[in-house]
Amino acid sequence: MIAIGRSHGKSLIRCAAINIRPKAIDISPLFVSTSIKCFIRMDEDSIPRFVKEEEVARCKWLALNKITYIDPRGKERLWEAAKRTTTCDTGCDAVCVIAVLKRLLKFDSLVLVKQYRPPMRAYTLEMPAGLMDKKETPEQTAVRELKEETGYTATPKHISPITCMDAGTENVTLQMVTAEIDGDTDDNKNPKPNPEESECIEVVHVPMNDLIGKLNEFAKSGVVVDSRLYSYAIGLEMTKDNTQSPSVHT
């Protein structure tokens, strides 16, 4: 329950205690039962506000900016942030594709990509993704990137609103697109990826019914699992019927 009201000219927001008891899920890092209580009081004049932004350095794909803003206590502060130099007119930088491969008499699989990421100094396991080209829709970007990285042709099903990726360090935005791949069509029986020259991508198929277990195996082998992918796996696991008492497995 959330109650919103006013007291002596001030906005008042109360959040009731929330008890979260997750089901038995084989996840890592640890999930625990949590009790959350919050009480927030905000003065009308305490809303954070942007003051100015200065570019400190710029490269081909990224820029480093210094942001001046006023915090909720009225104090002026500085924040360093990375920015994409390729943001499209739509205001979104990239698209990430949740691509499900469906084939007759076979389990549904999630189509993923494994590639070396220099900033991580390691291989990562991710959903297919890429930057939006100018005048491109999210659906068009999703279909194009999936074809380039995996060779599959898919039908977009759902598009998320514009979301943030790491709001503490950058202003990069992303839209999630769910897509269905008909694995029984001629085009998708022998897919041929066509990645960019700088990309070395391995296409990985993971059964949907054991997604989180397989991701844990990849993580134990030294592959860094993308947080969006792992969050999706947790969501799938939490929707499963489980009559056992809450417990944690790592």
Image: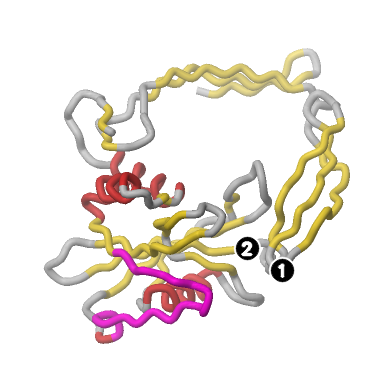
Position of 179 with respect to 141 (left or right) is left
Q: Which residue is mark 1?
A: 60
Q: Residue at x 41, y 21 (%)?
A: 34
Pick the residue in front: 64 or 94.
64
Question: Which badge, 2 or 1, is on the more N-terminal residue?
Answer: 1
User: What residue span does the magenta drawing correspond to?
Assistant: 187-204
Q: How many angstroms separate mark 2 from mark 1 (CA)?
A: 15 Å
Main secondary structure found in the magenta portion:
loop
Judged from the image, the secondary structure of the residue bearing numbered disc 1 is loop
- Residue 66 versus residue 186: which sits nearer the camera? 66
- The residue under label 2 is 93
Q: What residue is drawn where x is 25% and y is 55%? A: 208
Q: Can you tell which quarter of the image residue 60 is in?
A: bottom right
| Outermost residue toward the bottom in this view | 186
**Outermost top residue:** 8
Picture coordinates of residue 207, whole percent (x, y): 23, 57
Label at residue 155: none
- Mark 2 crowd level (few <14, some 14–19, many ≥20, 10 Å Cα): many
Tell whether position 161 is magenta.
no
Quadrant where the C terminus lies?
A: top left
Tell me the crowding category of disc 1: few under 14, some 14 to 19, or many 20 or more residues within 10 angstroms, Cα based: few
Does residue 172 appear to the left or right of 237 in the view shown?
Answer: right
Q: Quadrant of residue 39?
A: top right
Q: Label 1 is placed on what type of residue?
A: Lys
Percent across and percent down for residue 225 are 40, 50
Which amino acid type corresponds to the residue marked 2 in the rendered image?
Asp
Numbered disc 2: secondary structure: loop
